[in-house]
Image: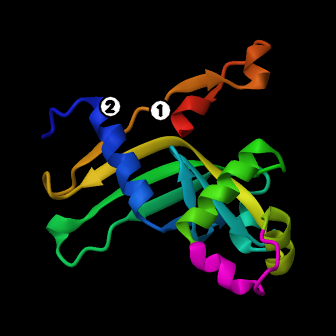
Amino acid sequence: MESLERTGWKRLAEDLIRSQTTVTLATAKGDVPWAAPVYYVNLGFFLYFFSSPESRHIQESASGAPVAAAIYCPASAWQDIRGVQMSGRIAPVPLGPQALRAFAAYMRKYPFTAHFFEAGQRIDLGSLTKRFRVRLYRFEPDLVYYLDNSIRFGFREEVPLQRRPTRRNRRGGLGTRPDKDSAT
């Protein structure tokens, strides 16, 4: 199974991400680390979640500081451990088509969210963020590893992400970011 093509690892990683509900985001300030579990919805490898702008993981990632993320399946034996390890950045999602797509996907994945509102009350991105004093954020990975102990103990394979130049890079800079198409 180790000879599985790189696109196969990508598919396995995306399937695992889609099947789970909670991502643990890890940040740090100085030499003090922090981990925060949040519900998410994915559009490809981009993870969308709601958090308070005042929460520690958002405050510590606000300056563009790197963030680590882990998603894994419940396991009762070491052979059952499967998951993804990622590093990337968190950014607020501005209101627009991307935010609306993420919100619609979130509501499909977590329909119980509607129970937090009164019957007949309009449920949209604005009402959710106002009611809970949260904002929509996106974790955008720059590195993803798929891990699967059913293959062998400690098995880990880098998942290829399509890259495209950022706006800054289109003007002559050197960096890249995951391609929009890799998010769907």
* Residue sitting nearer the eye, 23 or 180: 180
Between label 2 and label 1, give the one nearer the viewer.
2
Residue occupied by mark 1: 161
Q: Is residue 39 above or below residue 114?
A: above
Judged from the image, the secondary structure of the residue bearing numbered disc 2 is helix
Colour mapping used in the image: rainbow
* Residue sitting nearer the eye, 35 or 82: 82
Residue 166's x, y, as percent?
71, 26
Residue 27's x, y, as percent?
62, 63
> Quarter-wise, where is residue 180 in the image?
top right
Task: Give, as a single range, the part of the protein colored magenta.
Answer: 111-123
- Does the segment drawn in magenta span residue 116? yes
* Residue sitting nearer the eye, 18 or 169: 18
Categorize mark 2 by other alpha carbons within 10 Å: few (<14), some (14-19), many (20+). Answer: few
Name the residue at the front extreme. 120
User: In percent of the image, x 36 and y 51: which residue is there?
Assistant: 15
Residue occupied by mark 2: 7
- Does the segment drawn in magenta span residue 10? no
Indicate which disc residue 107 carries: none
User: In percent of the image, x 23 and y 55: which residue is there?
Assistant: 148
